[in-house]
Amino acid sequence: MKADEIATPYYIVYEDKLRRNLSLINRVEREAGVNIIMAFKANALWRTFPIIREYNRDFTASSLNELRLGNEELGGEAHVYCPVYTEATISEFLSRATHLTFNSLGQWEKYGARTLAAGVSPGLRVNPQCSVIETEIYNPALPGSRFGVTADQLAGVLPAGIEGLHFHALCESSSYDLEKVLAAFEDQFGMYFSQLKWVNFGGGHLMTREGYDVDHLIGLLKDFRGRYPWLQVVMEPGSAFTWRTGDLITEVLDVVENQGVKTAVIDASFACHMPDCLEMPYKPAITESVSDAEGLPRYRLGGNSCLSGDYVGDWCFREPLKAGDRLTLEDMNHYTTVKTTMFNGIQHPAMVLCDSDGNCTYLRRFDYNDYKNRMS
């Protein structure tokens, strides 16, 4: 089966693009001497994991569901961070995790002894208060953040038993952003490094993006490891693993016009199937569109839901759009596939894997029972 034979809407993942990213990540691991693990919050399409397992088996999880999926489908080291653990969840977290990071000193005081008794390596999330992210909704270093312990809260004393420190202050960021945060991290928390076994630099390292300075990243990491050779360095990027590895294929259902604004209504939804486009917000690339030019037909894309704000645009096209035209919304694998909903009962896009020979296989198709069971 070829891609153009599959009914829309569907997400498609390309094996060769996925392997390209995984190979680059392996190169950074090998040359820098660090451990780069996959974040489930960005990619949980587990039927692609046989490919990922060839390169990486370690992962990070932020919920029991992610943790269980990682145990079952990847099977490597299981790093866990959750803002709050509870009496109802802590035992299962400890039975499945290899490393567990606490968000606050109160959580450590409550569950630290049980963590050590379970043989799980405990860490503490810290906040270097170094902000390099422009979009506030994605910035964990904002004033008043609920994430991590600040240096003044430690007051020069790291609780006995803590084996690692974890910071997360990046989002689709560069190695130069990491350099700034890392300097703040060392300045504020370096006094504790001699007591540690590992440090976790969190996510947001978009090393697979075109133009990312991979050599600078490798040099930065090697320099850090040279200063602290006893520390295992862990990184847990989300987007980097599946950046530009998949698209959302959709079809124009109708074209409507109101007060001179033309909207192509598609058989997918930004609210349901591409929520980051509205949250960030950002306008995804469309393969079939062209650069803005005088006289070219221009359209918004509107989702097939009843939410008034379920639209993004504009884009230009060489020819007027019409019902039946297929559009390729690019880079819709990382985060997008794990954040989708069934608002309005809108049919969920199928999941498709395209192998290196161009042959496509359904990974999952959704039906009424998926919607019904999700709602009950």
Image (spheres, helix red, strand yellow):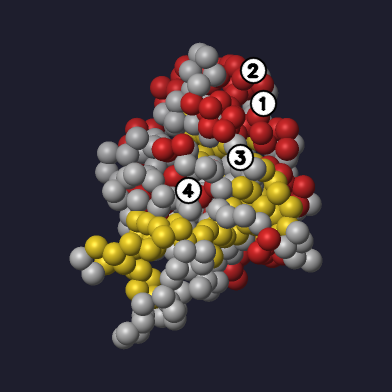
Between 231 and 177, the residue placed more toward the observer is: 177
In space, the residues marked 1 and 2 are separated at their CA atoms by 14 Å
Residue 273 is marked as 4
In space, the residues marked 1 and 4 are separated at their CA atoms by 31 Å
Q: In the image, which is nearer the foreground, mark 4 or mark 3?
A: 3
Give the mark nearer the N terminus: 2 vs 4: 2
Whether the residues at callouts 3 and 2 have beta carbons within 8 Å, the answer is no
Give the mark nearer the N terminus: 1 vs 2: 1
Whether the residues at callouts 1 and 2 have beta carbons within 8 Å, the answer is no
* Amino acid bearing label 3: Phe
Q: Residue furthest left?
A: 259
Crowd around label 3: few <14 · some 14–19 · many ≥20 (10 Å): few
In space, the residues marked 3 and 2 are separated at their CA atoms by 43 Å
Instruction: From this view, report whether residue 122 is shown above or below residue 212.
Output: above
Between 281 and 175, the residue placed more toward the observer is: 281
Residue 259 image point, x, y percent: 20, 65
In space, the residues marked 4 and 3 are separated at their CA atoms by 13 Å
Q: In the image, which is nearer the foreground, mark 1 or mark 2?
A: 1
* Amino acid bearing label 2: Ala
Q: For mark 2, what is the residue? A: 117
Q: For mark 3, what is the residue? A: 366
In space, the residues marked 2 and 4 are separated at their CA atoms by 43 Å
In space, the residues marked 3 and 1 are separated at their CA atoms by 30 Å
* Amino acid bearing label 1: Arg
Residue 136 image point, x, y percent: 31, 50
For label 4, the SS is helix
